[in-house]
Amino acid sequence: MTATPRTDDAPPEPKRKDRVHYLYVAVIAAVVLGVLVGFAAPDFAKELKPLGTGFVNLIKMMISPIIFCTIVLGIGSVANAAKVGRVGLIALVYFTVMSTFALTIGLIVGNLLHPGEGMHLTAESAAKAHAEAKGGEGTADFLLGMIPKTLVSSLTEGEVLQTLVVALLAGFALQQLGPAGEPIRRGVEHVQRWVFRILSMIMWAAPVGAFGAIAAVVGETGWSALRSLAVIMLGFYITCAVFVFVVLGAVLWFGARMNILTLLRYLAREFLLILSTSSSESALPRLIAKMEHLGVSKPVVGITVPTGYSFNLDGTAIYLTMATLFIASAQDAPLSIGSQISLLIFMIIASKGAAGVSGAGLATLAGGLQSHKPELVDGVGFIIGIDRFMSEARALTNFAGNAVATVLVGTWTREFDTARAQRVLSGQDPFNEATLLDDVPQAPPTSLQKETAGA
C-alpha cells in the first residue's frame, strides 16, 4: 500500500531555529560589555587584548584555504581561459577607477576640513612612527612578495596574494586537464565544504573575540584620543558613509539596478563581525559564500572577491589621503595642490598592497610617506591613538566596496542570476548559516561555463 500524502489538517513540520541568530545577539552584547569594561577597568581591559587577537588569528587561519578552493573551483570549471581573463580585466579596471575616485574624495574632504591645524606635533608624540614605517614596502618588494617560497607555503604562511597566484596556476592547470581533472575538482569541492564547516565552528568564538578586542581598545584610548582627534575621525566616518551610500549606491543602482540598502541588509551579520574585529578579512569567507548564494557565478566570485581584497580598498584609499593631509597640517607643513596630486598618484599604487586587516592601513601610510614625503613620517605616531577606531570604518568601507564590485562584475559579464537574487534578498531563499554553502542541485551553466560542453 502506498503512503497517503499529508493532508492540510496534518500538523506542520517544526521549523528549525536559527541558532546563529543568537550568536550575533551575543556578539552585540559582548561589544556593549566590552565598552563598559574598558571604561570601568581600563588596566584590566588592556589585558583582554589577546582574546580579540586570537579570534582574528583563527579567522585568518582559514583565509588561504578558502581562497585557494574558491579560485581553483571557479577557474577549473571554465573551458575558455580567455573568458576568465576578461572577468579579471573588467574587475581590475573597475578597482582602479573606484580607488582613484576614493582617493580624490579623501583629498577634497581633507582640504575642506583642514584637520590637524594648530596641533604643532612634537617628536615625542610621533615616537612610534618609524617602527610603523618599517611595515611599508617598495613596488619591487611587493611584486616579488607575490611569489611564494614553495607551492604550499602560501597556504601555511597566510599570504593572500601568494595564495591568489598559486590558486590561479592550479585553476588553469585543472582547466587544461579537461575530463581527466574531474576527480581533482570533486576532491577540491569536498575540501571546500570541510573548510567552511571548520569556519562555522570558529564563528561561535566571535562573542569572546569581540569582547576582548573592544574592551582593550577602549581601555587603551579612553575619551582623550576621541576628543583631541574628533575632527579627522568624524570627518573620515562621514566621508566613508557618503562614499558607500551615495557613490557606491549610485554605481550599484545604475550598473545592476539593485538598492545598496538591500544589499547591505543582506550582509548585516558580516558588517557586525567586521565592526567587532576591525578586520574585513574576518568576513571574507562569508562574503564568498553569500555572493555565490546571491546568484553571482563561482568563476566571477572566485576571481573578483580575493582580488578585490588586495586591489579594491576604497576605505583604505580615503584614509591614506585624509591622514596624510592631517599629518602635514599638524606639523605646520601643509601640502600644495601640486604635491597633493603627485601624492594622489603615488597612493593609488601604494594602496594596492594593503591587505584588509587591522593596522595594514597605518603601515601603508607610514611606508608611503617614507618613500614619497619622508619629512612627514614622524607625524604618523600621533594618529596611532585612534587608528583602531578608523580601521573599523576602513574595513567596513572596503567590505562594502568589494560586495558591490562582485555584483557589478557579475552583471556586466552576464554571470549574475537576478531572479535568484530577488528571491534571496526578499527572504524567500535564506542563506544556510550552518554550512555556508548551498546544498542544492547544480544550477544551469553560465555563459562562462557553456563552452565546456563544446570543448
Image (tube, rainbow, N blue to C red):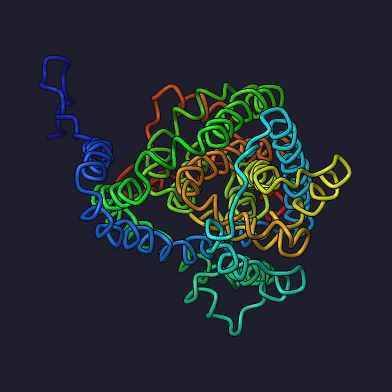
Percent position of residue 225, x then y: 44, 42
Percent position of residue 318, x then y: 65, 41
Q: Residue at x 60, y 84 (%)?
A: 149
| Residue extending farthest top | 9
**Image quadrant in which the N terminus is located:** top left
Looking at the image, residue 420 lies above or below residue 221? above
Looking at the image, residue 10 lies above or below residue 312? above
Q: Count every numbered label the image shows and give the total.
A: 0
Looking at the image, residue 51 lies above or below residue 158? above
Q: Residue at x 51, y 24 (%)?
A: 422
Q: Residue at x 67, y 72 (%)?
A: 146
| Residue extending farthest right | 338
Camera-side residue of 91 and 281: 281
Q: Residue at x 64, y 23 (%)?
A: 246
**Image quadrant in which the C terminus is located:** bottom right
Percent position of residue 177, x then y: 66, 72
Percent position of residue 95, x then y: 72, 45
